[in-house]
Amino acid sequence: MSQEHRSKSGFETRAIHAGYEPDPTTGAVIPPIYATSTYKQDGVGGLRGGYEYSRSANPTRTALEGALAAVEEGERGFAFASGLAAEDTLLRALCRPGDHAVIPDDAYGGTFRLFDKVAVPWGLNHSPAPVDDVDAVRAAIRPGETKLVWVETPTNPLLTIGDIEALAGVAHEAGALLVVDNTFASPYLQQPLTLGADVVVHSTTKYVGGHSDVVGGALVVRDHEVAEKVGFHQNAMGAVPGPFDAFLTHRGLKTLAVRMDRHCDNAERVADFLTSHPAVGEVIYPGFETHPGHEVAQRQMKRFGGMVSFRCTGGEDAALRVCERTEVFTLGESLGGVESLIEHPGRMTHASVAGTDLEVPADLVRLSVGIETVDDLIADLDQALG
Ligand code: P1T
């Protein structure tokens, strides 16, 4: 698909066709899994198509990276071995010891651990700020020192919404870049680069892969200079996915739009059901008009996503009991797969933020609502809540 044609196409067409032309030799419609570490050179430095070694580039990965750039409307996409590998590479590509970053006060526990336990000893400091409070983010910026404003929207696990356009303005005023972790929304629901963000981060393990069968990460960037730095570090640090993982992730991306619509349909129904249950306190879903970020979400997201969090009136014990009693919802970390998952963030995905500004409520349960029959999901929660 030509670059020109690609840029005019709709989301689904880009997700399915961008990044790859049927193989000129065989006509293979799908990118082959190039299980090769190296490439024959036609004389020293005579590379075929630029391929010399699979850490630097591999055709299966190239196809995925082209598709990721297209769906996020970015200049270039980069695939990594995991979401955290993507994040680590980005920090080292854009920051130096002595720099500072503003981070969300609600974020994936592993992201916080990377900032707090890996980046701090390396020399990168951070300050947490609520992503839905632009003034607080502005106040957390240290002029001259802050290189990145890093947000998740919706956040993990409290589903807080940050106004990407406004946050980009605040970051750019201070000479910093805005990084948006778009994992929870997925590129189908939200394209942060079109709203002024500089870099999009994904754990492609989640909605992009979509089938809970592969771990991966991605960065998509808007600007050539940032692309050069990230590309250099991707090769120099080497945290790349193998061709099998790139293949699975790319296969998942092609059906993202149809899966995501069903995730949203089901999440809306599940969230509505939970609000009427006596064992449930607050239900957190950006699709509710009462959610403080609803208007911003409506402006910047196509729909409100497949994640629902809720608090149990019976406290932590009740939350743990619900997690252990469901039968269709599987108790497990991660999200974004076709199957529904349930977890207790305080003890599981967010155990690493205990005792910090990012600590999550003990009575909180997080649902990744899958694409099963929605009546079965509701019946399962009903029996588990007792
Ligand atoms: O797990 P990995 O592919 O390395 O991605 C890390 C990551 C980054 N950003 C967000 C918003 C995430 O949710 C994650 C991973 N999160 C989980 C495993 C989880 O259950 O929340």
Image (cartoon, rainbow, N blue to C red):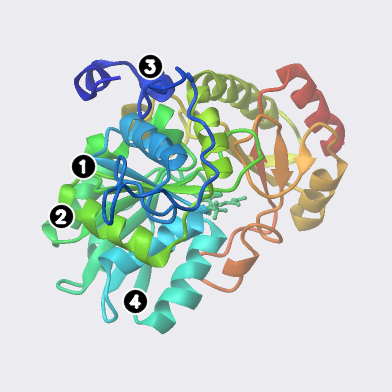
Q: Nearer the viewer, residue 226 or 363?
A: 226
Please state which amino acid type lies under the numbered disc 3.
Thr
Instruction: Name the mark on residue 196.
Output: 1
Give the distance between the C-alpha atoms of the residues marked 2 and 3, in whole angstroms.
32 Å
The residue drawn where x is 43% and y is 45% is 58
Q: Nearer the viewer, mark 1 or mark 3?
A: 3
The residue drawn where x is 38% and y is 31% is 67
Q: Earlier in the sequence, mark 3 or mark 4?
A: 3
Give the distance between the C-alpha atoms of the residues marked 1 and 3, in whole angstroms.
24 Å
Give the distance between the C-alpha atoms of the residues marked 1 and 2, in whole angstroms.
9 Å
Rate crowding at label 1 as few (under 14), some (14 to 19) or many (20 or more) other CA atoms within 10 Å: some
Q: Earlier in the sequence, mark 1 or mark 4?
A: 4
Instruction: Name the mark on residue 124.
Output: 4
Which residue is labeled 3 in the image?
13
State the quadrant of the C terminus: top right
Q: Earlier in the sequence, mark 2 or mark 3?
A: 3
Q: Earlier in the sequence, mark 2 or mark 4?
A: 4
Instruction: Name the mark on residue 358.
Output: none
> Quadrant of the rendered structure where residue 129 is?
bottom left
Q: Are marks 1 and 4 in contact (CB under 8 Å)?
A: no
Please state which amino acid type lies under the numbered disc 2.
His
